[in-house]
Each structure stands twice: as structure tokens, then as C-alpha cells.
Amino acid sequence: MFEVKETDLAGRIGRLRTKGGTLETPALLPVIHPYRQEVEAGLVKELGFEAVMTNAYLAYKHYGPELLEKGIHKAIGFDGVVMTDSGGYQVLEYGDIDITPEEVVRIEEGMGSDLAVLLDRPTGLTRDRAEAEWTVSETIGLAKRSLKVIRRRDIVWVAPVQGGVFEDLVKLSAREALDLGFEMLALGSPTEVMESYRFDMLVRMVMAAKSVSPFGPFHLFGAGHPLTIPLAVAMGCDTFDSASYILYAKDGRYMTDWGTVRLEELNYLPCSCPVCSKGLEELMEMDEEERVRNLAIHNLYVLKKEVEATKEALSEGRLWEYLMLKARAHPRLYQAVKLLSDYVDMLEDGTPSFKPRALFFFDELDYGRPEVVRHRRRLNWMRKREKLILALGTGERPFYGSKVHREILKALGDRAGEFQISFILPPFGVVPVEVSDVYPLSQNEAPEGYLEETAKLLIPSIREYVESGGFSKVLVLDTGSGGEFLSAISSALKAELVDLKGLAQA
Ligand SMILES: [Zn+2]
């Protein structure tokens, strides 16, 4: 059903097979109203969206039993992949709705959904643990009831995961859904989390669910903001639905790559889609209905571009760099991205050991990058010699071919075999000369002054290397540059600071 083609961080490019067609993921599914469409479903398809999300409950309520003959694709006018939500969200919005899980399954089977979400009980953003526990056990109970009446196996059944901000409940909810045999999970992300830019909460919730379900296809509800798309993809969300394009449009909000701006606050249109090509003046002069439609179309263009840009970055192995760039768009996003290093094990699994390009480093966030953490872990497996010489890494790579290395060998003469020669390279930490050509230790670039700016982050990993190595002697080589940093290192390690001449006598 789901095949992964490429990975980077916890993100993946995959193929999700459904009866309505194979969907390449990550994919954003615009939410289509079952009968009141400001942007008609056919146009959404033309704009490049292969799949949409609509509401089974609202569709059935409107079309009645006739819908089961017609099918959902015809009813909404979309001939791609159609995912249907059960209406659980309406419970949260409008209080109880009069539908049972068995009816939802019957309706979704009847209307021929390609991906169908079971009825659930959304947790929302409640801080009341007892209430959250109740929604999770209700959701599990509803999934069990649904499972009993499922007949159509050609539909991809999607089990909702609830639990809200309680990570253990999210894990429990996900585990129960997998135990019931559902392969695809969908995390309910409270709208409030998105609206209040609590991206850190989003990271914790998604990673909690993904820690239980790292392999199967994973849907995230309501992540249609240009800022959340790269983050959601990096965490391993394969599909996400969003009504944001139309909700923002109705609110007069214009999406940009970095957020949204109120239309009347715009002086220029930073976009070259067909809507924006008409110009700001024309857009402002439109009547309300037409403007909403045009804004929504523009918003869809922006979302489509964001999904494509994220996929391209993933495919090139620079999803991390792309995410770091996006992180600068909003302090809350920056905070959330920083939090990702708490989940480095999960991110490392999908990060290739070799990439056909150099890694770019900019600042301290890169210390938590999976490739960097991976190097530090590998260090512990390497054979170490009796004594250690630490030298500053230079621009000459790999280090074994560098001038400094030749000079060290010359100074040591016959005693070279006793010494482990290692170089200090931010953000990796220590790089033993023997492995300095292993990717990405020679394939990376950082701005000038990077060492000085991030030195305090570098020292603990150097100390760890030295302490675990059990060296009988540790020398820090002073070659004339990085004086202040080298003194700090030698005093942190209680090691002797020597120059090349001193090395010859050491
Ligand atoms: Zn535009």
C-alpha cells in the first residue's frame, strides 16, 4: 500500500496506493466543501493537487442516499484521490452529531472514498487529563466498532490518533490503532495549536505518534500553512489536509512563503501566479465573492509551491538546510525546529549516510543535525592509540593530506605510531585523521568565524572524546591560529598546549 522511495530526516517521498490512483507523498489535500465550493474541485486538480479531503458526514447529510449511488468523486466533481473525514471534527465544533461509527463506515463504503477516516472523538487542546483520557478511550472504542462492520478492503482505512497535548496518551492512542490492524494513522492536531503558532506542541505531538508508528503512512490534520509544511514533512507526515487556503481567503488573508498578510496591508504582490499577475489594484477592485475565490486560488498556488519546494529539498538531501531557512520566518517555528534535536534518533534513521553534496552549516542549530550527531556516536567505535594530539581543522581536506598533518608527522618522526592525531572541526567535534575523508567530514562548508561563535557547544563533545579514549597523554597543538579557543580547550582538558617544536620534544 505504501512504498518509500527517498528519505531525509524523518521525511520521505513515497507512493501511497489507493483505489482512486497512486498518490505521491508528501501531499497536501485541500479541503473541499461537499457542495459549496468557492474554488471548484476540478480547478483544484488542475492546480496540481492529486487528492482532496472532504467531509463524509456533511456530504451525506446534503445529498442523502443518492450519494451512495453517485459516489463521492462525481458528487464533488473530483476524479483524483478522495479522502473523507468522518465528521468527528464537527463534534468539537458544533457539539454532538447524530451519527454512529457503523453509519460512518457504511456511508464511506457506499460513497466510495479512497481513503476513509473513522469516526473519532477529538481531544482538542484541553489541559484536563481526565477529559483527554476519555476522548482517547472513546476514539479506540469507536475504531473497534468501526472495524467490525468494515467490508471494503480496497479502501485505505485511516485510524485517528487523539490525546492532544498529552504525549503518553497520543502514544497509547497510536499503539491501540496499530494493534487493531490499521496501517495508516491520522493525528488530530488541534486547530488552536496551529492558529496560536504553538509549533513546539505540534512537534511533541507528532513525534510522540511517530515514535509508535515510524513506518506506515501518516496523516496530519490541518497543517496547511506555508510554515508548517516543511516541518510536518521533516517529522515524517506523508499527507496533510487543510482548509486554510479558503479560510484565509474569506478572512482577506494572502499567503506568502513566510506566512500570511492581510490584503489591505499589502503594497506589492510577492507572487507570480496568474491571480497575482493581474495586479493588486484589480484584486482590490473585485467584488467580495470574486476576491475570495481569487485569493483562495493564489493561496493554493503558494501551498503547492511549498510542497514542491519541500519535496525537492528532501530529494536533494537538504531538507535540514531548507528547514533552517524556514525557521527564520517566525520565532515560534525556530523554537520548534530547535526542539527537533531532542528526537535526533528518529531523524537519523531516515537521513542517508552519503549525500551527493556538501552540508552547509550556519549556526548552533547545526550541532543537533543528524549527520553531526551520527559522527559523534561513531567516534566511540573507533580504535584509539595511546596518546592524543588535537589540532585545529583547516580548510585543507581531507585532513590527512593537509600541511599541518605532514608537519605533525615530521615532528613526531618514529613516534608517530603512538599518537592518535585528531582534528577539531565544528559542529562535528573531533575528527580522527584516518576518517577525515568519510562523508560528510570533508564535504561541508561553514562561514568564517563559525568556530569562535559556536565554541562553547564544541567543548563538551571534545571532552567526552578525550575522556572516553583513556589517553595517557593529551597535547593540544598550537599552530598560530585560534589561540583563544585553543587555550580554552587545553585548560578544559587539562592538556598541554604545544607548538610544532614542542611536539618534537614531547
Ligand atoms: Zn499569487
Image (cartoon, rainbow, N blue to C red):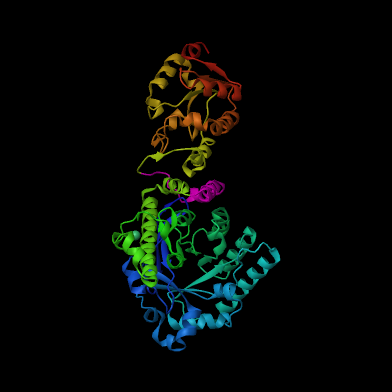
Say if the magenta span includes residue 446. no
Say if the magenta span includes residue 345. yes
The reply to whether residue 189 is in sight is no
- Is 352 rendered above or below residue 146? above
- Is 178 rendered above or below residue 390? below
The reply to whether residue 326 is in sight is yes
Give the image quadrant in which the ligand numbered 1 is located: bottom left
Predominant SS along the magenta part: helix
Q: Going 41% across and 27% down the picture, which residue do you hit?
A: 399
Total numbered labels: 0
Q: Is 275 on the left-hand or right-hand side of 207?
A: left
Q: 260 or 493, which is in the foreground? A: 260
Q: 329 or 282, which is in the foreground? A: 282
- Is 245 rendered above or below residue 348? below
Q: Going 53% across and 60% down the picture, which residue do you hit?
A: 195
Magenta highlight range: 330-355
**Residue 21 horizontal/vertical position (percent):** 36, 71
Where residue 5 sits, quadrant-wise, is bottom left
Q: 364 or 256, which is in the foreground? A: 256
Where residue 176 sits, quadrant-wise, is bottom right
**Residue 390 horizontal/vertical position (percent):** 50, 24
- Is 378 rendered above or below residue 249? above
Q: 211 or 365, which is in the foreground? A: 365
Location of the N terminus (image quadrant): bottom left
Query: Residue placed farthest to the right in the image?
Result: 130
**Residue 320 horizontal/vertical position (percent):** 44, 47
Q: Is 27 on the left-hand or right-hand side of 471?
A: left
